[in-house]
Amino acid sequence: MDEDNLNLEIRKFLKQVGISSQRKIENYIRKKFTEGTIKIGESIKVSMNLSSEDGELNHSIKEDLKIK
């Protein structure tokens, strides 16, 4: 297996995930802030799930984002 190619492919995937996820989260928070649903000082719980098509890979990350 070509380790360099594998590394590049994973980095491309993670870059796409990172950029698109950040935009989605920012838009969501701005919308909720504008609606008055969230306020400064509050937190929003977010999570990200990573899985493979065959179901053998399953990884979840959860975080609280504090609004300032």
Image (spheres, rainbow, N blue to C red):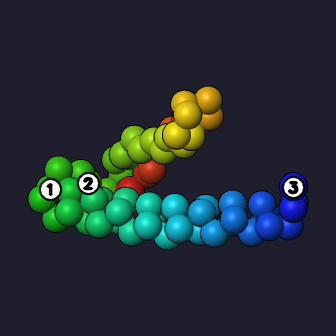
| Residues under numbered marks 1 and 2 in contact, where contact means CB atoms less than 8 Å apart | yes
The quadrant of the rendering that contains the N terminus is bottom right
Query: Which residue is at 53% across, 68% downward?
Result: 16
**Mark earlier in primary sequence (3, 1):** 3
Asked if residue 15 is positioned above or below residue 33 in the image, the reply reads below
> Mark 2 highlights which residue?
39
Disc marking residue 36: 1
Q: Is residue 27 visible?
A: yes
Q: Amino acid at mark 3?
A: Met
The secondary element bearing badge 2 is classed as loop
Q: Amino acid at mark 1?
A: Gly
Asked if residue 43 is positioned above or below residue 56 in the image, the reply reads below
Residue 28 position in % (x across, y down): 28, 59
Q: Amino acid at mark 2?
A: Lys
In which image quadrant can residue 67 be found? bottom left
39 or 19: nearer the viewer:
19
19 or 32: nearer the viewer:
19
Query: Which residue is at 20% across, 63% downward?
Result: 31
Query: Which residue is at 43% across, 67% downward?
Result: 20
Q: Alpha carbon of mark 3 to alpha carbon of mark 1: how far? A: 52 Å
> Mark 3 highlights which residue?
1
Residue 10 position in % (x across, y down): 69, 60
Query: Which residue is at 60% across, 63% downward?
Result: 13
**Mark earlier in primary sequence (2, 3):** 3
Q: Alpha carbon of mark 1 to alpha carbon of mark 2: how far? A: 7 Å
The secondary element bearing badge 3 is classed as loop
- Residue lying at the far front of the rendered structure: 1
Looking at the rendered image, the disc whose residue lies closer to the viewer, 3 or 1, is 3
Instruction: Give the number of marks.
Output: 3
Few, some or many C-alpha atoms within 10 Å of disc 1 (few <14, some 14-19, many ≥20)?
A: few
Asked if residue 44 is positioned above or below residue 15 in the image, the reply reads above
